[in-house]
Image: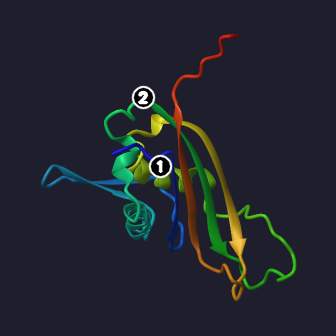
Amino acid sequence: MECLDEIIVFAYGTPKQQGSVKTWFNPVTQMSRVWWSTKGLGKWRSSIKAALREIDPQSMFMEGCEDSAYEVTAVFFFTKPKSYKRFLFYRHTTFPDLDKLVRALFDELSEHVVGDDKRVFSLSARKEYVDVGSASNEEGVFISVRRLPRTIDRRVK
């Protein structure tokens, strides 16, 4: 089977950021409990995982693909608040943080597509609002992952 050059998927659901890790130490049992502070993160990551399973992500890092770099594009879509005017375009500059949204996405991409997020060479990410009642009113994330050769021959011929 050949390596895929590009995958494009849409994961439905409300995007959640990967927040801080919280720990709790029980002095009686001398054990610690660790969990992510963002509610709904597990459900969101499952949604990304389900979208990635629709294609064959295993072929992205099969034998012979290990020496690849990846270019990732992610567009996170959120429902526009009702207080915003319908005919105006608003840039999404509020919670959640874009870098933390990308962190949650990269954890799933590392596990299911690229093998390790250090192999991501280029990243383009942004947050957008969708209008309720429009044709594309779904919350979620558009994900595009392109496989690139790790080296480029720049010698003059």
Q: CA distance from mark 2 to mark 1?
A: 19 Å
Position of 54 relative to 5 (above/below): below
Please state the horizontal and vertical placement of residue 16, each as a whole percent of the image. Answer: 51, 65
Upstream in sequence: badge 2 or badge 1: 2
Q: Residue 36 location, x and y as percent?
A: 39, 58
In the image, which disc is placed on residue 71?
A: none
How many other residues sit within 10 Å of disc 2, few (<14), some (14-19) or many (≥20)?
Answer: few
Q: Foreground: 8 or 43?
A: 8
The residue beneath circle 1 is 106
Classify 10 Å Cα crowding around label 1: few (below 14), some (14-19), many (20 and above): some
Percent x, y of residue 33: 25, 55
As drawn, the residue found furthest toward the right would be 88
Residue 67 location in percent, x, y?
42, 28
Viewer-nearest of discs 2 and 1:
2
Report the residue that reaches farthest toward the left.
Answer: 29
From the viewer's perspective, is 93 left or right of 57? right
Identify the secondary structure beneath mark 1.
helix
- Tag 1: residue type? Phe
Quarter of the image with the C terminus in it: top right
Given residues 82 and 53, the one toward you in this image is: 53
- At label 2, the amino acid type is Asp
Q: Residue at x 45, y 40 (%)?
A: 117
Q: Which residue is mark 2?
A: 67
Do the numbered discs 2 and 1 sit on residues whose CB atoms are within 8 Å? no
